[in-house]
Image: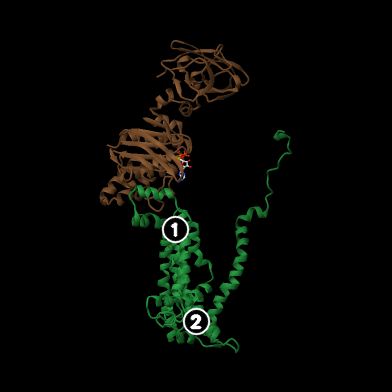
Amino acid sequence: MSITSLKPLNLTFPDTWWRRNQMWVTPLLLLLPAAVVFTIFVIIPIFQSITLSFYDWDGINPKKWVGFSNYTELFGDEVFWKAIFNNIWWLFAFMLGPVFGLALALFLNQNVRGIRLAKSLFFFPFVISQVVVGLVFGWFFNSQFGLLNELLSHFGVEPLALIEGENTATFVVILAGLWPQVSYCMILYLTGLTAMNGEVIEAARMDGAKGWNLLWHIILPQLRPATFIAVVVSVVGALRSFDLVSIMTLGGPYNSSTVLAYMMYEQTFLNFRYGYGAAIATVLFIIMDVYIAFFLYSMLKREAR
Amino acid sequence: MAEVSLQNVRKSFGAVDVIKGVDLQVNDGEFCVFVGPSGCGKSTLLRMIAGLEEISSGELKIGGKDMTKVPPSNRGVAMVFQSYALYPHMSVEENIGFGLKMAKVPKADIEARVAYASKMLQLDTLRQRKPGQLSGGQRQRVAIGRAIVREPGVFLFDEPLSNLDAALRVQMRTELSQLHQDLKSTMIYVTHDQIEAMTMADKIVVLSAGLIEQVGSPLELYHRPKNLFVAQFIGSPKMNVVPAKVAAVSGDIAHVSVDGGSMLALPLRGGKVSVGDVVSLGIRPEHMSVSSEGVMQATVKLAERLGSETMLHLSGPGGAAIIVRSDGLASEKPGDVVALTMPAGCCHLFDAAGIAIVNGALI
Ligand SMILES: Nc1ncnc2c1ncn2[C@@H]1O[C@H](COP(=O)(O)OP(=O)(O)OP(=O)(O)O)[C@@H](O)[C@H]1O
Ligand SMILES: [Mg+2]
């Protein structure tokens, strides 16, 4: 059968409104649902919270306008400064996430038997729930029947009360938080490493780059997108840390391990001080905004180069 | 100077033997081309010389020194990769100068060399660009520049032109030949391309399944192939091979009967055959011609008219596919039955195992 014996084709298309405008209408339509949901559940509540922070409210009685007094009280609150201070500790410690993540990724990025299993085991902490992570670490460090002291007793070391200690509790919680964070950064870097052109590394080896030089001049620059995400995610993770504090220490002892997010929760839902809680939320929001603006700025500047 | 010599070099990946004992001598300043079918081990062999693959056994010497276990950067070799392998985050000049920077060459010297190389490769106006902002040909030049500045004794190229379009490939081919003449360094070059191999090489190495089939100059391989594999691998379109039988031997002349054709008297020039031997008769397309009376009859299946010449695809006795290179204005058309002549001095004879008994008398 020759093609001429087929029915003639009509390859002209009608010139409709949709055909002329679909290039800009389609993205708009696709964006619409997300935009609506985001507005209702994120944008509007942000403004509601900020408004609420100027009121005194217990959730039942009528709200009372108090101006900035929630903020003045907050800045005079010792627990607030403790929380900020602890958040800064979280921030610093979480910067180890990308570092250890990269180290692990470099270590696991090789072709040997069983490496897939090893990779999934290292990724495991990220998969399991934060609640489980908190419980495991909490039990491990428990001073009376924790595994740590059990182990130490074999070496004749006196039992340690780390998670119960005023000066050490935060660090135990941070350690628990770092564990899944490292796995997450590791996965980010592993993906970046897999996508890298092996011949580029070989070319660098031919050019005499080894070890630290190879990492610094060739591998790290190519992992920049992964580093960017790893750092952003770690900073955000440190600033909004809440669940582990809530599971492991409830901010204690004596608020020594509290963080902004936990303090906000405590004031709002346990002490029923909605206005005060909203003020903490607003401060946290501003800190994150400043940080994100700084990061976006430096990223855009780099892109523009 | 930088001659490369391989002695009984082997490579296996686990249980798989990829290079099965290669002996090769590449002289200083020579342009040596590796050819062979896909998967025969060309890249592996090149990477072993570069130091990117470990040598399982055997010895590699570069410039007379044992380099078998020396790391890549200390072998005095530079490699140009098929994918160019430029550092994506570095500008053209940083790419070219990186090797020198690693070797802690003073900044001023690096600058001078990068300037020299960029000028030579016509990259001067592009020095600040990133690889992503370059065309394929320009990237290739950067990759070559990166090799040049290190002043290696040996350049290694793994199919460097295969990602370029046809016109650019022709241009880069002449540029590379020019580069070789200017630098006078040893170059080892892997390619799939017949024309690259024939035009650029001083020495061609034909590989097959991890072994060297033959080493020689392009014309030597073309006219005096040691076996059927080389005979058919070198040359495009490839050598015609028709089955034949030795009917009689008288002194130094063998009378060979082509299956389905007539008798052909071939001077043996020292080759040994016995009456009754089953052989293969090989002859290149340009050495056969269509005439009123010839050795065998064949039917024209297709005439490819290239302007300067016509490739006649014919079906010989017993359906053997034969290609004849004929005049650009040849009048034959599909369906014509023609007679083919085979001048005795152009014919090759191969024994049943494919080893050459007689090569043509052309060179
Ligand atoms: N890392 C490896 N592990 C196992 N086998 C390998 C490895 N690298 C290459 N091989 C095998 O070695 C053989 C030779 O590979 P090589 O890349 O040298 O071929 P080549 O001649 O360069 O082919 P091409 O012309 O397609 O580039 C192939 O059969 C390939 O499958
Ligand atoms: Mg190859």
Across and down, in percent, residue A42 comes to: 57, 72
Three-letter code for the amino acid on which mark 2 is drawn: Leu
Three-letter code for the amino acid on which mark 1 is drawn: Leu
Count of labels shown? 2
Chain coloured brown: which letter?
A: B
In the rendered structure, the answer to whether residue B315 lies left or right of residue A254 reads: right
Across and down, in percent, residue B117 comes to: 32, 43
Which residue lies at the image location 33% right of the left edge and 45% below the top edge?
B69
Across and down, in percent, residue B83 comes to: 44, 45
User: Residue A46 falls in which quadrant of the image?
Assistant: bottom right
In the rendered structure, the answer to whether residue A208 lies left or right of residue A41 reads: left
Could you tell me which secondary element the residue under label 1 belongs to? helix
Is residue A95 visible in the rendered image? The answer is: yes
Disc number for residue A250 = 2
Chain coloured green: which letter?
A: A
Which residue position holds label 1? A108
Mark 1 falls within which chain?
A: A
Across and down, in percent, residue B24 comes to: 36, 34
Mark 2 surroundings within 10 Å by alpha-carbon count, few (fewer than 14), some (14 through 19), many (20 or more): some
Which residue lies at the image location 40% right of the left edge and 27% below the top edge?
B218
